[in-house]
Amino acid sequence: MVSRLQFFKRLDLNPTELILKKIEIAKDMYNNWQEVFYKDDKFLSLLKKYEFSVLKSNQIMGEKGTFEECYICTVLENKGCCKVGLENEATITILLLNMFLKKDIPEEREVPGRCFFVGPLGCKIFARPYLCREFFCKRILDKLSQKDYAIVTQYINEELTLLYLITNYIKNLLEFLIGEFLLELDLTGYS
Ligand code: SF4
Ligand code: SF4
């Protein structure tokens, strides 16, 4: 396992190669260990809570208009903050989490110059990295009242706490199964 993760030490990987390598490793681990995870009640309960929390924060952000603002910014105005390279904020555990939730992971960069996960309507992955969920640009902050900002933040906090718990659970269980420290699973690989 250690040798398969040595790519993190190579500084010559471009962002696309890096995310493709991380996806390949996540797929491999998913195929090897999915049965163990799907039999683990604690994991399944966390998975359900996390999925619900994402749906809930998406619903709140939809109601408060932040998604619409990002759609206008990204798709209509061709601006947006989902730049090329940011895909690597997705760690192997976050990629695995999407797989455990049976969510599709894109296999190629659809929009040149943008994050690997950007599609015509915005982000295509369900379980998103911390940075993507906690970042609020000035445009979004100006749109939200203080009260709405507090409400959105509360739901995002809940989601990110669960993201932390479940990605740690995945890493710890894999370390137990494989018998090695797997710190690389939680690294972005480019910083
Ligand atoms: S967060 Fe701000 S910069 Fe990023 S897409 Fe939304 S409106 Fe645009
Ligand atoms: S929100 Fe999605 S598309 Fe945007 S940077 Fe994050 S992972 Fe990439």
Image (spheres, helix red, strand yellow):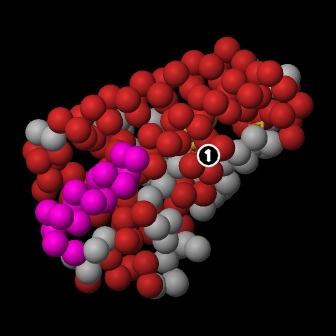
View extreme (right): residue:
142
- Give the side of residue 154 with respect to residue 182, left or right: right
Residue at (38, 79) in percent of width and height: 7
- Give the side of residue 42 with respect to residue 76, left or right: left
Q: Main secondary structure of the magenta part?
A: helix
Q: Badge 1 is on which residue?
A: 132
Q: Is mark 1 within 8 Å of ligand 2?
A: yes
Q: Which residues are magenta?
A: 165-180
Nearest to the observer: residue 135 or residue 124: 135
View extreme (top): residue:
63
Nearest to the observer: residue 132 or residue 170: 170
Q: Position of residue 85 (x, y in %)?
A: 60, 61
Dividing the picture into quadrants, the one containing residue 76 is top right
Q: Position of residue 109 (x, y in %)?
A: 51, 52
Residue at (81, 33) in percent of width and height: 140
Nearest to the observer: residue 118 or residue 66: 66
Residue 159's place in the image compared with 91, above or below, is above
Rendered-image quarter of ligand 1: top right
The quadrant in which the C terminus is found is: bottom right
Element class at badge 1: helix
- Asked whether 145 falls inside the magenta stretch, the response is no
- Give the side of residue 30 with respect to residue 83, left or right: left
Can you see residue 36?
Answer: yes
The quadrant in which the N terminus is found is: bottom left
- Give the side of residue 123 with respect to residue 178, left or right: right
Residue at (22, 57) in percent of width and height: 173
Dividing the picture into quadrants, the one containing residue 145 is top right
Q: Position of residue 38 (x, y in %)?
A: 15, 39
